[in-house]
Image: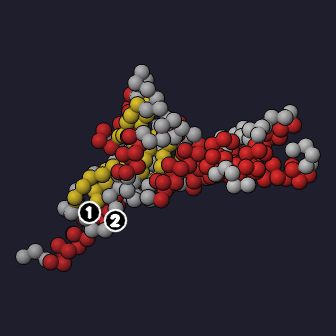
Amino acid sequence: MQNPLSTQNKKCESKKKTEQAYHRNGLTETANPNLTKIVYFFSPYNRAGCLFSKINQTTKGGIFINTFAYVRVSDASQNENRQLDAMTARGIPAEKIFSEKQSGKDAKRPALQALMNTVQKGDTVIVESISRFARNTKDLLVLVEKLTVKGVEFISLKENIDTATPSGKFMLTVFAAAAELERDYILQRAKEGIAAAKVRGVKFGRPTKKPPENFGEIVAQWENGKLPYEEVLRQTGLKHTTFYCRLREYRSALKNNPTEI
């Protein structure tokens, strides 16, 4: 008769070995009787490397961890095979790769939107370079922030950015600071350009709508009750707000220089 304690010890030892295998460098696929799904993710030791771990996740607690890839070229004449090869070489299955031929200027790219809607907490998104993922630094920060809110990590191979690492978070901080600095420079240059243009007599905004030459006569008839307000607007060609602005200017000028009106 088999010793129950011996059987229990064997089960504990098997479980211990399984747990140890989970944390290895990604070269072992363990057999777990509670296996419900095999999913791919970057090994903690090789997040940006070439080897992936196959992790067996049970239904009891935890999160299913998936690695997704995003691949993009700007138009149909370009070939995305280089990016696809880079992702498949890192063990990402085809069904986890979101690929499209769209300009980076279009923020509502179908495959990108599908990716953002698919990823869940604990997942990872990998791209060949940030230029394939975002059109500029501002766009990159917005997209990464959306992933961060969902609990999703982001990796860019070319720039060696991994938001799960301190160095990756630092790189994003640098990008954010650079983007803010660039915005400040743009605003500063715009203000300096406007100031210089005003010195040269350039006027900004919509052209001022001037009243007709007989504006004073129209106003006098209106004030004497000889002309309805709707007719005043029709004859002057002014909108309600503009009419009262011109009226204030007219009365101010009349008060200051009555002989010139």
Residue at 51 percent across and 40 percent down: it is 134
Q: Residue at x 34, y 65 (%)?
A: 62
| Residue 49 percent location from the top left of the image | 45, 43
Element carrying mark 2:
loop
x and y percentages locating residue 203 in the rendered image: 78, 37
**Callout 2 crowding tier (Cα within 10 Å): few <14, some 14–19, many ≥20:** few
Pick the residue in front: 161 or 78: 78
Place of residue 59 in the rendered image (x, y in percent of width and height, measured from the top left): 25, 64
The residue located at (48%, 41%) in the rendering is 107
Q: Label 2: which residue?
A: 62
Q: Which mark is residue 135?
A: none
Q: Quadrant of the C terminus?
A: top right
Residue 205 at x, y = what percent? 72, 41
Indicate the quadrant containing the N terminus: top left, top right, bottom left or bottom right.
bottom left
Alpha-carbon span between mark 2 and mark 1: 8 Å
Numbered tag placed on residue 58 in the rendering:
1
Left or right side of 151 for 181:
right
Sort mark 1 into few (<14), some (14-19) or many (20+) by Cα contacts within 10 Å. Answer: some
Q: Which residue is at 23% across, 73% downward?
A: 9
Toward the top, the furthest residue is 77
Left or right, 6 with reference to 121: left
Labels 2 & 1 near each other (Cβ < 8 A): yes
Task: Report the amino acid beneath label 1.
Answer: Thr
The colouring scheme, among rainbow, by chain, secondary structure or one colour, is secondary structure
Q: As drawn, is 119 to the left or to the right of 206?
A: left
* Amino acid type shown at disc 2: Gly
Residue 148 seen in the figure: yes
Q: Secondary structure at mark 1?
A: strand
Horizontal side, residue 107 vs residue 39: left or right? right
- Residue 21 appearing in the image: no
